[in-house]
Amino acid sequence: MKIAILGGTGDIGEGLALRLAQKHQIIIGSREAEKAQEAANNYNKLLKEKGMKDDIRGTTNLDATKSADLVILAVKYQFAIPTLQAVSDVLDGKIVVTPIVPMSKQKLCAYTPPEQGSAAKHICSVMPPEIRTVVAFQTLPAPRLADLGDPLGFDVIVCADDEDAKRVVMGLVSDLGDVRPLDGGGLEEAELVESLTPLLINLAIKNKTKPLSVKFV
Amino acid sequence: MKIAILGGTGDIGEGLALRLAQKHQIIIGSREAEKAQEAANNYNKLLKEKGMKDDIRGTTNLDATKSADLVILAVKYQFAIPTLQAVSDVLDGKIVVTPIVPMSKQKLCAYTPPEQGSAAKHICSVMPPEIRTVVAFQTLPAPRLADLGDPLGFDVIVCADDEDAKRVVMGLVSDLGDVRPLDGGGLEEAELVESLTPLLINLAIKNKTKPLSVKFV
């Protein structure tokens, strides 16, 4: 599958790109093509060193979206809507995946959803109804995902109102390696999944552990 | 420690009573003493059959609270405040533990916190400031906790503003068997923990599994 990772130059984007590139064609998107190409080059270098498939490309968010079947919105919450609006003309028929979590941080993190109830519902509310929104990847700690030596062994919860789109993204989760996709319901349930991220960050801070993920047992 | 489990005649109360009775003096509370005594007798019978310590007592919520050092409020959210108010005269100096989760259920469950932000903060707001409120046990599926053959192997997150009270309850969590206590922060963080319960229920429904708990890895 052709996957555009918008904002794929950092954080969760890096690990998703490195791992999904083994089974899919990954196009990193950024506001500036140059920045995206630089990130793609760095990722390919990392992959080449490990003898892994290294054909990640980089371009603008618009061009990345144009050539993709599925778009992962790997940006901070405050950039989600402007990023989507900038590519809205070429989104038709595509799946939009949101790993986004609206949160604030003082000493610990708090979940700060918008009035729509979750980032996913906010995103969904500004897009044409034919764009299928899928919630996923909230429980993946970025540094461990980007560390190709980390065996992971996590669960990722996927929520969507469209069952076909949900199935596609659950397949992508499995393609990350030892990561189990779980069905979390529809977009109405997105807030229960988004609020896991501040919880995971707080648990790591308070219990002085490595970045944490989750396994449902 | 002397532990009163208010509303200990059912649901999460049963498993907590059976397992904590091995290391603590458990007093089941109910609105009617007879109902509490009947539950205590049933629990003791179960424990005796397994050759385990079987000295659980049952009495009214008021008497149970009076003789306890720590009170577990094992009632549904809508009964939390009236139950506490009925025992408020004898609560002085005690720790109140809340496993309570405000939720609604249609096809799936939703977290429905009150305007205070969480059940824990609501409970805390109606009690004198010297009563120490501790959040715990939200991730324990009641039927598996009550099944003494279940090896558990879960994590339980404990939140409290009072560090001493938090430590006491983290100790209790360890006393359940193979259950790891994790520090989740203060009462401000309670909503992140309470909202895990509807998530766990939904995941079991949508993925057709046994009742689920959680492990942070």
Image (tube, coloured by chain):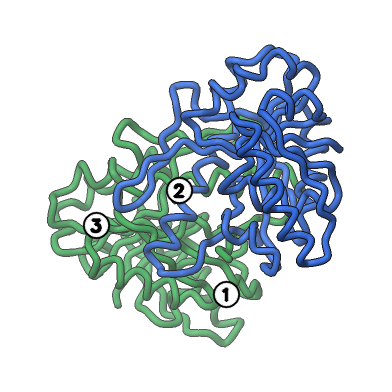
Chain colours: A green, B blue
Q: How far apart, in angstroms, are the residues tagged by discs 1 and 3?
A: 36 Å
Left or right: residue B31 compared with residue B209: right
Q: Tell me the quadrant of the picture where the N terminus of chain B can be found.
A: top right
* Picture coordinates of residue A149, whole percent (x, y): 65, 75
Q: Quadrant of residue A36?
A: bottom left
Chain that bears disc 2: B
Q: Which numbered disc flags the more N-terminal residue, 1 or 3?
A: 1
- The 10 Å Cα crowd at callout 3, few under 14, some 14 to 19, many 20 or more, is some
Determine contact: label 1, label 2, CB under 8 Å.
Answer: no
The x, y position of residue A34, in whole percent, is 39, 59
Instruction: For marks 1 and 2, give the CA distance.
Output: 40 Å
Q: Residue furthest bottom?
A: A51
**Residue A108 appears in the picture as rendered:** no
Residue appearing at x 69%, y 27% in the figure: B133
Q: Nearer the viewer, mark 1 or mark 3?
A: 3
Q: Is residue B105 above or below residue B5?
A: below
Mark 3, residue position: A161
Q: Which residue is mark 1?
A: A46
Q: Residue at x 73, y 25 (%)?
A: B63
